[in-house]
Amino acid sequence: MQTGNPALNLSVFAVFVLITLYIVYRASSRNVTASDYYAAGSSFNGVQNGVALSGDFLSAASFLGISGGIAAHGYDGFLYSVGWVVAWLVGLLLIAERLRNTGRFTVGDVLAYRMKQRPVRAAAANATLVISFFYMIAQMAGAGGLIALLLNVESKVGQALLIAVVGAVMVFYVLVGGMKGTTWVQIIKAVLLLLCVTLMSVFLLGKFGFSLSAIMENAAEHNKLGEAVLNPGAQYGKSFVSKLDFVSLALSLVLGIASLPHVLMRFYTVPNASEARRSVVWATWTMVTFYLCTLVIGFGAMALVGSDVIAKAPGGENSAAPLLAFHVGGAVLLGVVSAVAFATILAVVAGLTLAASASFAHDVYASVLKRGNADPRKEVRVARITAIVVGFLSIIGGIAANGQNVAFLVSLALALAASANLSTILYSIFWRRFNTVGTLWSIYGGLVSCLVLIIFSPVVSGTPKSLIPTADFDWFPLGNPGLISIPFSFLCGFLGTIFSKPEGNNRKAAEMEVRAFTAIGSGL
């Protein structure tokens, strides 16, 4: 499908990249210490960090995947939006302030606060690397579908080469800008994305007489399922297994966000716990605005473009928003929307890469290998080398997953995050008896069980839409393993603690409890 002028589309994207690269370069001049590189010196206020926090999560999954999910499946596609908005309440009520009071740079700081440092930090770093890798695969897969539309590149080889270019730019953001540069890119990207979806939504509503009902009725006429797309069950109500799959998906969405390493790391970029709480409030309202717009855009794409056209386009469901932009505003609007989507991918993957590299450098290199005596400059150098390796792996993974719905791929990363991190964080903060054995059991129990269930699920093999469609070794029926792996991680942490000897760290546990709830002793 021809979608405008590739040169124009590429020019719009290039302008954004050049502007943000300049901002990243300027920000890099202030990266003096490890704190500057990892946490921007805690120099952002709650409003700035809230917008950046929303930018960290408003990814290709949100813009391309959810819009495409709604355009293809209607009501069931919108359930992703509901889950991701509600999820921020978990972060607001249980995690944000306490995490800010007890850590410095990474999740490992919190988990190892009153535990044996080396094994716990190594486990936290392993979990962060796996979760970040899965999340980055989703973003790079979104880049592949978008590139196909933006530059009319139909061949898989061409898309793979351009995915590599996107990955290279992303790594450059992290190497040069650190957290300061990445945060400013997130803020700019979030503002542009909100403006983009808001203007598109207002235009679509105006076209249909400012009636959402009119958009939805027209959309149902252009979907082979008819009015069924306006009701629950078009995707997840076909059988008992599909209903269980939805419950599992919802659990992963609601509990996964507050467990994502790159989201948790963002709480350290503000000066105190009050600003961390303020960040989540601003991020939540930004999300509400954005996801309401995706409802209009998704059904608008179904109405004006048609589900069949979207399904057959390069990138599949992920093409819904760009195709709608081309239908509404031609090549210019397609270029703008594609540039914003590309900016989304670049910024989110940069944040993920930073979280992964910081976790390895701070938790493994500085704390495990160097036993806390690492030179800060060498630690940052290790973080940059790790960023290059992680970026390379994400490019490979993105090429392999090209064409998959990115919102669904992100749900797998959320299941991994909730399985490995949530139980461990909550036990560490709220349960004094919790010990090192329980920590290791909950991290590795949740992480390994989730990975095994994903590998042997229809996501990887057994169906035409699987990552390996020619293979068939799926024995786990659910597409998302959260229903099993998340409770299993809580059980592992509980049993590991109960059946092991207490560590006698009551004083440290009491100190952490006071610090988490009051910030006394945290230096904030």
Image (spheres, helix red, strand yellow):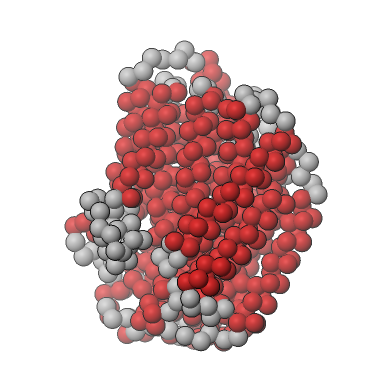
Q: Residue at x 58, y 27 (%)?
A: 368
Q: Residue at x 41, y 46 (%)?
A: 416
The number of numbered badges drawn on the structure is 0
279 or 403, nearer to the observer: 403
**Quadrant in the picture for the C terminus:** top right
Question: Residue 360 appears at what percent x and percent y?
Answer: 58, 38
Question: Residue 239 appears at what percent x and percent y?
Answer: 19, 61
Is residue 244 in sight in this rendering? no
Give the residue at the far left of this rendering: 240
Residue 489 to residue 27: above or below: above
> Could you tell whether 370 is left or right of 29 in the image?
left
Is residue 403 in sight in this rendering? yes
> Could you tell whether 178 is left or right of 30 in the image?
left
Residue 435 to residue 335: above or below: above
Question: Residue 50 appears at what percent x and percent y?
Answer: 61, 52
Q: Residue at x 72, y 30 (%)?
A: 375
Q: Residue at x 63, y 59 (%)?
A: 168
Question: Residue 463 appears at what percent x and percent y?
Answer: 27, 64
* Quarter of image, res 276: top right
